[in-house]
Image: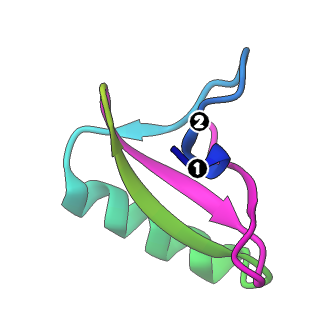
Amino acid sequence: MSRAFVSEPGASTLVRATEESARNTADVYRTIEPEFDFEIRHGRNGWMIARLKKDGTFDSWVEE
């Protein structure tokens, strides 16, 4: 699995119950942080949002 989709220890990652909710949240983050790209990924506990640099490399998970 890509390191971009492995949880960081101690992080409080934002998790959404539905794909639609995660997509909507990612859209909000695209508006307020245009210097990043955002992708949603399905994990064991729901849908998470990865913050990516414009070159596609992982920056961080969107946190609560």
Task: Tell me which amino acid carries mark 1.
Answer: Ser
Residue closest to the eye, 63 or 50: 50
Please report the bounds of the magenta region as a residue range.
45-64
Mark 2 touches mark 1? (CB < 8 Å): yes
Inspect the image, locate mark 2, and give the three-letter code of the amino acid beneath it: Val
Image position of 43 (left or right of 32): left
Q: In the image, residue 40 lies at what x, y percent?
A: 41, 60
- At 55% from the left and 45% from the top, the residue drawn is 5
Residue 21 in the image: x percent, y percent?
Answer: 27, 56
- Is 30 situated left or right of 40 in this image? right
Residue 7 is left or right of residue 19, and the answer is right
Crowding at dot 1, Cα within 10 Å, few <14 / some 14-19 / many 20+, comes out as few
Q: At 51% across and 71% down in the image, what residue appears? A: 28
Q: Which residue is mark 1?
A: 2
Q: Residues within 10 Å of mark 2 (few under 14, many from 20)?
A: few
Vertically, is 62 above or below 34? above
Residue at which label 2 appears:
6
**Residue at x-position 58% and y-position 56%:** 50
In the displayed image of the protein, which residue is found farthest to the front?
A: 1
Q: Nearer the viewer, residue 8 or 30?
A: 8
Q: Check disc 2 and report its element: helix, strand or loop.
A: loop
Which residue corresponds to the image point at 51% horizontal and 38% vertical from the top-left? 14
Give coordinates of residue 12: x percent, y percent.
62, 25
